[in-house]
Image (tube, rainbow, N blue to C red):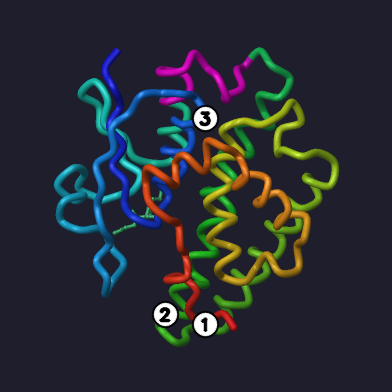
Amino acid sequence: MSKPVIHHLNISRSQRILWLCEELGLDYDIVHHQRDPETQRSPASLCAVHPLGRSPTLVHDGHTIIESDAIIEYVTRRLADGRLSVGPDSPAFGDYLQWLSFAEGSLMGPLVFDLIYAWTGGGNEVMKSFYHAEILKNHQYLDATLATRDTVVATGFTAADVNLGWTLEFSECRGWLRDFPRLTAYLARLRARPAYRRAIARGGPQDLSVFAAGVT
Ligand SMILES: N[C@@H](CCC(=O)N[C@@H](CS)C(=O)NCC(=O)O)C(=O)O
């Protein structure tokens, strides 16, 4: 089987895919790309790989795939016999799909609005109160789940935890984890995993302070 190629933008969601491949013990290549230091957007080198210039982008066997959730399912099912995924025959299937999607589908969007609001120095207060309430509710929901178990899926560690890890790092740098010691402890457990550390060693440090605008 040919090796997947992970296009990795510094300090970005592609950290998830490096980490996942390390968890699965897969052989992979990395192509490094650097954010534009002014705008933090993707450079021309990544836009040449995919018209949206997205990180992560995975290239494998002639397929170029974006979206973390899709890449995670592709990697676990196509390249790792379903390891760290949960199949339709498991009672945990629904939970797995929900939590896999939660990182990008619910948590991340309002957090990005929060950052843009801080970067641009203001905006619509009605919008702000709407997405602040969403951020809080999303964190409370995840927190309540982790009150009953160590991982988001009751059967144990899965790729859904990998997807959530980077989002919680982003949330942490935006100051939203301060009131959630259980989420902070969950993130610490994820960061302590040897595969997470190997991914950092290969991909480079994840210093998200560049996204901490407006956080005091
Ligand atoms: N929903 C996508 C979001 C991908 C995304 O927006 N990634 C950011 C990096 S964290 C990016 O590509 N930023 C550079 C840019 O948009 O120019 C996913 O989960 O992969």
Residue identifier under label 2: 119
Left or right of 149 on screen, residue 167:
left
Label disc, if present, on residue 23 of the rendered structure: 3
Tell how many labels.
3
Q: Nearer the viewer, mark 1 or mark 3?
A: 3
Is 82 magenta? The answer is: yes
Image position of 55 (left or right of 33): right
Q: Quadrant of the C terminus?
A: bottom right
Looking at the rendering, the stretch of residues picked out in magenta corresponds to: 75-88
Residue located at (52% from left, 41% from top): 196
Residue under label 1, please give it: 214
Identity of the residue drawn at 26% across and 75% down: 38
Q: CA distance from mark 2 to mark 3?
A: 35 Å
Q: Amino acid at mark 1?
A: Gly
Secondary structure found at label 1 = loop
How crowded is the residue under tag 1: few (<14 C-alpha within 10 Å), some, or many (20+)? few
Ranked by sequence position, the earlier of labels 1 and 3 is: 3
x 41%, y 17%: residue: 78
Q: For the residue marked with disc 3, what is the amino acid?
A: Glu
